[in-house]
Image (tube, grey):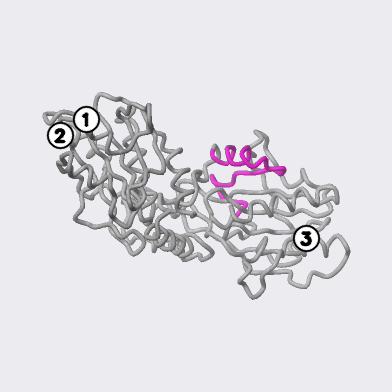
């Protein structure tokens, strides 16, 4: 990877910490306006639990297809309720530690239950830039299967009653109860190593409970992402409305201009997607490409569409872009995009083969629309999708690139 692209990675890492790390301020300020005809959930009444309080009951669906209740775990000597989720970077960082807690102490009478408190509709696109999966129930099933969770993974996103009853304001956040289901510890699963109180707090608390010792730190400050309460859907709708109001344009580009585009002398990653109207998968995937733009709006990425239909079809191609609101993101300190540079192009050259050749296809591959490539500064192609547009595959690669 080039030195200039490493600087992008530094900006990206900083953006991740500021936008989605351990501060509840990770969420954008709530908009002052909202659609008048739409009713949003009220701000949640979250009181939280004090040490010694009983465990609130719950009845929640699990990714295993079963409904789970508190009474189901009545035989456990220690019960750990972990509120976590798919999208939060901190939850994913501590995912292996949560799995290890479950497996290491299962034979000692400790039961761990994970609950996702988030309303998936309350997540803005840019809040899932660090992951391929969001927080829907179906995506929870995918993550549990991928990681082979040894514990129940329950969904509270519809009513969020469990999150409100427990006081789960962040993910990940753990509540550990004794055999009588009295709260003995709450807070962080683990604190970051640079924290003054860093350490495997949940593990230490469980060890103390099993040995009959006093828990020295029975309440610690959780570190993670704010719970996505239902009222935040208002912010998501406002964000969507702002995007949909942006102008959508298409600029002409000839072969020389396209070669310069593909050479990528900019300080950003470029994802170039070549498409055509007669390819139904190209048109169908346009909304997914637009969503990728919104997801990575705070990353040093330019997602560029290039239409290769005849000039007479430019108006029709532009109509597809407008229908999908394929607008350009606003520049930010983490996404130094030139506001004057187009991101939707109509190729005006006659030699389509020369266009594809500029994208450096692998030997033996005959490119055709849809065709997408990722190009780092300096012109090196690091990822290609030929004859398909797989948004999830593109997201997976982008997550890997921006973690470098």
For the point 49% across and 55% down, which residue is it? 404
The residue at 30%/29% (across/down) is 369
Q: Is residue 229 above or below residue 212?
A: above
Q: Is residue 161 above or below residue 255?
A: below
- Counting from the top left corner in percent of width and height, residue 268 is at 33, 55
Q: Determine the image quadrant of residue 171.
A: bottom right
- Left/right of residue 253 with respect to residue 184 in the rendered view: left
Residue where numbered disc 3 is placed = 182
Q: Secondary structure at mark 1?
A: helix
Query: Of label 3 and label 1, which has the lower sequence position?
Result: 3
Residue at 28% over, 47% down: 263
Q: Residue 22's x, y, as percent?
A: 54, 64
Q: What span is in magenta? A: 139-164
Q: Pick whichever of labels 3 and 2 is earlier in the sequence.
A: 3
What residue appears at the point 15 percent right and 40 percent down from the top-left corner?
254
What is the residue that sits farthest to the right in this orientation? 211
- Mark 3 or 1, which is nearer the eye? 1
Give residue 349's mark. 2
Q: Which residue is mark 1?
A: 352
Label 3, residues with CA under 10 Å away: few <14, some 14-19, many ≥20: some
Q: Quadrant of residue 364?
A: top left
Q: Is residue 335 visible?
A: yes
- Tell me whether circle 2 and circle 1 mark residues in contact (CB < 8 Å): yes
Q: CA distance from mark 3 to mark 1?
A: 69 Å
């Amino acid at each position: 990877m080039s030195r200039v692209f490493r600087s992008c990675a530094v900006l990206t890492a900083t953006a991740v910490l500021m936008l989605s790390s351990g501060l509840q301020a990770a969420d954008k300020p709530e908009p002052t306006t909202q659609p008048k005809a739409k009713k949003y959930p009220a701000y949640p009444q979250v009181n939280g639990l004090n040490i010694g309080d009983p465990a609130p009951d719950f009845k929640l669906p699990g990714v295993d297809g079963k409904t789970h209740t508190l009474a189901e775990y009545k035989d456990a000597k220690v019960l750990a309720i972990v509120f976590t989720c798919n999208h939060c970077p901190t939850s994913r960082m501590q995912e292996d530690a949560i799995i290890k807690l479950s497996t290491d102490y299962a034979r000692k009478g400790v039961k761990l239950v994970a609950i996702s408190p988030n309303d998936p509709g309350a997540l803005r696109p840019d809040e899932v830039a660090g992951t391929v999966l969001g927080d829907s129930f179906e995506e929870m099933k995918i993550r549990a299967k991928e990681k082979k969770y040894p514990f129940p993974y329950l969904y509270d996103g519809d009513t969020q009653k469990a999150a409100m009853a427990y006081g789960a304001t962040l993910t990940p956040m753990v509540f550990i109860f004794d055999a009588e289901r009295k709260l003995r510890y709450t807070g962080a699963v683990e604190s970051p190593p640079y924290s003054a109180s860093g350490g495997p707090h949940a593990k230490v608390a469980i060890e103390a409970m099993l040995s009959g010792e006093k828990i020295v730190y029975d309440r610690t400050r959780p570190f993670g992402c704010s719970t996505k309460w239902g009222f935040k859907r208002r912010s998501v709708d406002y964000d969507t409305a702002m995007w949909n109001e942006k102008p959508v344009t298409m600029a002409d580009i000839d072969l020389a201009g396209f070669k310069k585009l593909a050479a990528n002398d900019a300080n950003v990653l470029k994802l170039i997607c070549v498409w055509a109207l007669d390819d139904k998968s190209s048109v169908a995937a346009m909304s997914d490409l637009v969503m990728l733009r919104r997801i990575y709006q705070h990353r040093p990425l330019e997602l560029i569409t290039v239409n290769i239909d005849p000039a007479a079809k430019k108006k029709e191609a532009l109509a597809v872009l407008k229908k999908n609101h394929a607008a350009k993101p606003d520049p930010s300190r983490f996404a130094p995009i030139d506001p004057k540079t187009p991101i939707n192009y109509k190729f005006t050259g006659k030699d389509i083969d020369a266009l594809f050749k500029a994208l450096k296809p692998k030997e033996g591959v005959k490119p055709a629309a849809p065709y997408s490539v990722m190009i780092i500064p300096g012109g090196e192609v690091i990822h290609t999708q030929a004859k398909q547009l797989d948004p999830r595959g593109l997201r997976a690669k982008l997550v890997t690139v921006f973690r470098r």
